[in-house]
Amino acid sequence: MEYSKALNLPLRRRLAEEFSRWPMTLKIGSIMFLGIVLAGIFAPWLVPYDPYTQDLNNTLQPPSLTHPFGTDNFGRDVLTRVLFGIRIDLPFGFLTTYVPMVYGVVLGAMAGYAGGFFDGILMRVLDVVVAFPFLVLIIVIVAILGPGIFNIYLSIFLTAWTMYARLARAEMLVERNKDYILAARNLGYGPGRIVFRHALPNVINSSIVFSMSDFVLNIMLVSGLSFLGLGVTPPTPEWGAMIAEGRDFIFEAWWISTLPGLALVVTGAALCLIGDGLAQRLGERRHALI
């Protein structure tokens, strides 16, 4: 009853009431993440330096008013490179999380609803993929294809969908025996309509919550691969590559590696808070609908 009344309210009021019901973790995480996104968007206007321009007369300068994050071994402003790194790491994390999520959830939901031969084939494919450690599999694929951002995208698109498929399949196995699915079948609705219009909104919740932690892992993955020399190549301002560049100067110029690493930690914390808040809020909404 409460939910049906909410649907009759104006959009602005519904959004305001929805935001007021958000858990504090979701609010804090969203504000932090929005700040990071805005910093990346407005990076060219927030800092006066170019992330690629070298100044060999100002190498390894400690943090100061002129360079709040100091300079690196080529005299480049570290704050500038950290802000421009947002433009690389966040889009990478978003695409490598939500592109595999789309077809992973669709395949898993269809397999869970249909069962039989299609379900058996999908599960055998999943068993083969998950038999190898994810990180090792990614490193092997990238090592074969060669370093570069495109090859990292390709390797993750080939492997990252499996967890979403498993989650969606497990949820669908529960949903397909519920009354609303049985009623839809009795009304003569086809499998496509039942899966995509009726079941998928209930199946996808666990995948949305999991995607927040997957987002963090994918950002850390590209940073780790860049650190190993298999990801983004210098002089591109990517956080992992910056950490790798500063490891030889960690004792005399700690800021080169530490501050990009701190940016990675803050971004991960924001996404984890969003994930925790989403899990709580989606659980409350689902309980209200029952």
Image (tube, rainbow, N blue to C red):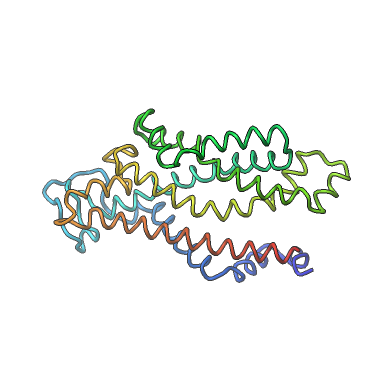
Image-quadrant location for residue 116: top right
Q: Position of residue 66 (x, y in %)?
A: 20, 60
Q: Is residue 67 above or below residue 73?
A: below
| Residue at image location 83% in from the left, 41% down from the top | 189
Tell which of 115 and 210 is nearer to you.
Answer: 115
Q: Is residue 126 above or below residue 183?
A: above
The C terminus - image quarter: bottom right
Q: Position of residue 160 (x, y in %)?
A: 51, 41
Residue furthest to the left in view is 57
Q: Position of residue 45 (x, y in %)?
A: 34, 54
Tell which of 50 and 198 is nearer to you.
Answer: 198
| Residue at image location 64% in from the left, 38% down from the top | 107
Q: Is residue 28 above or below residue 234?
A: below
The N terminus - image quarter: bottom right
Image-quadrant location for residue 251: bottom left
| Residue at image location 21% in from the left, 50% down from the top | 247
Tell which of 279 and 242 is nearer to you.
Answer: 279
In the displayed structure, does residue 234 sit left or right of residue 276?
left
